Structures are given as C-alpha cells and as structure tokens.
Image: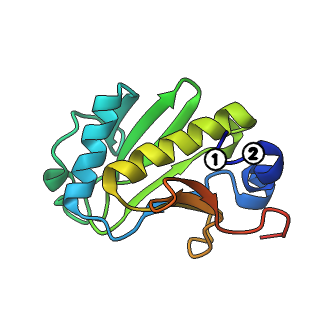
C-alpha cells in the first residue's frame, strides 16, 4: 500500500496552488548530515551534478562545501532519482538541508510513490523528518517523512485551501 494516494493529495501537487517548486527541508541538520546526503546520492546510483555558479565542478566534502565564503558562487547539487525528476539541493547552511523539486514532474501515483520513497531514503538515513511546504510558505509543511511512523504522512488537510 502506498504512503499517500494520488487522488487524495493531488492538490498538494498543483503548481497553481503550491508554487512550482515547494520548499523541502530537514531541520536541525549538521555538516555530518550533509555529508550523509552527499554519500547517499552517490551510493544510490542516482544521476547527479554539482556546480558552483555556472561551473560544474567535482563534489567536495561537506565540510569544504559549507565552509565557502558568503560571497562565493551559489552551490547546487542537482540529483535525478529517476529520469525526468530533478531535485535541487542547496548546500548553503549546515543547520538545515534545503532542496526543491518541480511539481510539474510529480504528477500521478507513480511519481508520488517515487517522491515518498525518496523522502523515506533521506529521512531514514538521517533519522530526521523530511518536510515539504508550499513555495514561499516554509513554516506550513503539508506532508513529510515521519521517522516514528517510518513513512510519508500528511501534515495538512489536502481538501482545504492552503
């Protein structure tokens, strides 16, 4: 049985309501958590690319990536857990793992299941919740991986306007 059922949660995947790039985060993170994500991306065999500004460069250790000067080019780790779905990690702060994903790439039960699996892999590896909120509404997550339940759960009612 899937964590979430598309017909019940599809409003959370409507770019018109949620923005096309919802905010996803793992709070109370550390440099070690970022390194665990870097290692996980490589171990899972997902496609990925790391860049700083416009330059694609090798992915350094999290300690180096997060120690970059404030005025340095913006780092981004692009990950493709499956073809046609791109996740953008923004390694700019050690205290929070931020990433986004394009809702237009997440339509239907199959892609929802993929997203739930992706959140679960990260949440299990870190032992922390993975929260998804509407774009620009960071403080109101609508769903996320719950460590205790060991699955993705609803955190808001998908039938109510956000």
Q: Is residue 28 above or below residue 126?
A: below
Provide residue 90's location: percent of width, then percent of height. 39, 53
Asked which colour scheme the image uses, the reply is rainbow
Q: Is residue 1 above or below residue 48?
A: below
Quadrant occupied by the N terminus: top right
Using the image as rendered, state which of residue 23 and residue 131 is in the foreground: 131
Provide residue 33's location: percent of width, then percent of height. 26, 56
Provide residue 88's location: percent of width, then percent of height. 46, 45
Q: CA distance from mark 1 to mark 2?
A: 7 Å
Q: Quarter of the image holding residue 72?
A: bottom left
| Rendered residue at 34%/58% (across/down) | 127
Q: Is residue 114 above or below residue 24?
A: above
Q: Which residue is mark 2?
A: 5
Q: Quarter of the image holding residue 58?
A: top left
Quadrant occupied by the C terminus: bottom right
| Rendered residue at 28%/30% (across/down) | 43
Give SS at disc 1. Answer: loop
| Rendered residue at 52%/36% (across/down) | 86
Give SS at disc 2. Answer: loop
- How dense is the environment of label 2, judged by Cα within 10 Å: few (below 14), some, or many (20 and up)? few
Which label is found at residue 3?
1
What is the total number of numbered labels drawn onto the structure image? 2
Q: Is residue 41 left or right of residue 162?
A: left
Q: Is residue 81 left or right of residue 106?
A: left
Mark 1 vs 2: CB contact within 8 A: no
Provide residue 105's location: percent of width, then percent of height. 66, 36
Residue furthest toward the bottom? 139
Q: Is residue 140 left or right of residue 148?
A: right
| Rendered residue at 85%/64% (across/down) | 159
Using the image as rendered, state which of residue 90 and residue 31 is in the foreground: 31
Q: Is residue 148 above or below residue 122?
A: below
- How dense is the environment of label 1, judged by Cα within 10 Å: few (below 14), some, or many (20 and up)? some
């Amino acid at each position: 049985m899937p964590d979430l059922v598309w017909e019940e949660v599809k409003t959370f995947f409507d770019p018109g309501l949620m923005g096309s790039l919802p905010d996803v985060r793992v709070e109370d993170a550390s440099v070690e958590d970022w390194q665990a994500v870097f290692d996980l991306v490589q171990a899972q065999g997902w496609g990925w690319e790391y860049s700083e500004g416009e330059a694609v460069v090798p992915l350094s250790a999290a300690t180096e990536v997060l120690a970059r000067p404030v005025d340095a080019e913006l780092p981004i780790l692009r990950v493709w857990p499956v073809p046609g779905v791109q996740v953008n990690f923004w390694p700019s702060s050690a205290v929070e793992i931020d990433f986004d994903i394009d809702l237009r790439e997440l339509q239907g039960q199959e892609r929802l299941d993929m997203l739930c699996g992706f959140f679960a892999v990260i949440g299990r590896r870190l032992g922390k919740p993975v929260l998804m909120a509407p774009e620009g509404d960071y403080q109101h997550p609508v769903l996320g991986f719950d460590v205790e339940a060991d699955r993705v759960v609803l955190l808001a009612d998908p039938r109510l306007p956000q």
